[in-house]
Amino acid sequence: MKKAFINDIAYYLPEKVLTNEQIAKEFPEWSADKVASKVGITERHISAPDETATDMAYKAALKLFDQGIDRSIVDFVLLCTQSGDYFLPSSACLLQDRLGLSTHSGALDFNLGCSGYEYGLAIAKGLIVSGVAENILLLTSETYTKYIHPQDKGNRTIFGDGASASLISTDGFAEIGEIVVGTDGSGAENLIVKSLGARHKTMLNDLRIDNEEGLISGDYLYMHGGNVFNFTANVVPPMVEELLQKSHLKQEDVDLWIFHQANKYMINYLRKLLDIENEKFYIYMEFVGNTVSSTIPIAMVEARKEGRLRGNVLLAGFGVGLSWGGVMLRINQE
């Protein structure tokens, strides 16, 4: 049977940076240090007003090609985004043309958030194993900051914009092993933007302030932090156990754990819950924030630079949907 590998990864961050000091000026009741200690983030990158997720995916792809990937070999484009340029057509089709890729390439978007990279690896592996494609450009790109209300200080401290580009191929530095995915759509309203879709084609204009949850509006990103936290704590441990069993590995066989970089408190809670050694648990969010589907590929790039990407690497994503996904990678010696 054919095998699928991650051949290379690159990422792009917008130029504008929003620091904790800038946030503290808008919300004097919060200090920069308080934000950093609470979420583990000191700054995040913000897409320009005229910069879309498609623009960022394009720039991430160019960086990947600049690293030595020949764009002529790409025969499929997968774009994970929840903020496409248009209702139709697919932004992946726009990127095929904009990047000058072969018209024999397949191209599609898939709408997913924080588990998007793992789902993308699953789709790409399926395309390779089935013989549909051999060199897949997997893109993740999100502009959540465009959907956050200016007075929503909680979400503004967490989310940043960013994009990643990976070549998934028949050879590479990381073999894509076993995969576990799951969905619980009953929790959809815990992380949602309601307006401007087919269900609510116009703005809802329903802004209100809740004493416990803060600012709530169907026109902007809404996240029920407590429910999302509980969901994560409930689904991640059994997902990890299932993935280890499918991979015929024990927890101590995992050399590096890379979880979706949601916020420092949440992922450290998961680390302790699973009793994962601190030195085997990779965190990279301080200067980028939560970039949704791009957090794991960004962290992988940085871990690889540090020489920490080796052996068995377990990836775990979880969030909007509600959904979750885990992938076991086997890193080849470089």
Image (spheres, helix red, strand yellow):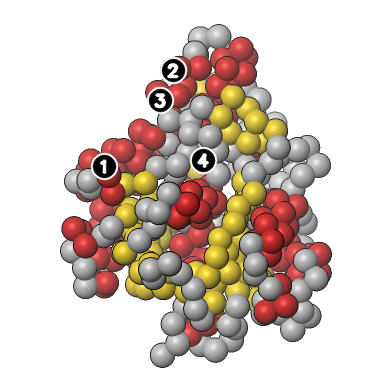
Residue 128 lies, with reference to residue 78, above or below; the image says: below
Point out residue 23 in the picture as x, y percentages from the top left corner: 59, 19
Graded by Cα atoms within 10 Å as few (under 14), some (14 to 19) or many (20 or more), the crowding at tag 2 reads some
- Which of the two discs, 1 and 3, sits closer to the camera? 1
User: Could you say which quadrant of the image residue 206 lies in?
Assistant: top right
For label 4, the residue is 290
**Can residue 257 be seen from the camera position used here?**
yes
For label 3, the residue is 38
Image check: 14 left or right of 228? Answer: right
Q: CA distance from mark 4 to mark 2?
A: 17 Å
Point out residue 279 in the picture as x, y percentages from the top left corner: 27, 44
Q: Earlier in the sequence, mark 2 or mark 1?
A: 2
Image check: 289 left or right of 234? Answer: right
Residue 30 tag number: none
Instruction: Identify which residue, 263 or 253, lies in the foreground.
Output: 253
Point out residue 67 in the picture as x, y percentages from the top left corner: 64, 62
Residue 63 lies, with reference to residue 278, above or below; the image says: below
Q: Earlier in the sequence, mark 4 or mark 2?
A: 2
Q: Earlier in the sequence, mark 1 or mark 3?
A: 3
Q: CA distance from mark 2 to mark 3?
A: 6 Å
Residue type marked 1: Asn
User: Could you say which quadrant of the image residue 216 lies in?
Assistant: top right
Residue 34 tag number: 2
Graded by Cα atoms within 10 Å as few (under 14), some (14 to 19) or many (20 or more), the crowding at tag 1 reads few
Residue type marked 4: Asn
For label 1, the residue is 278
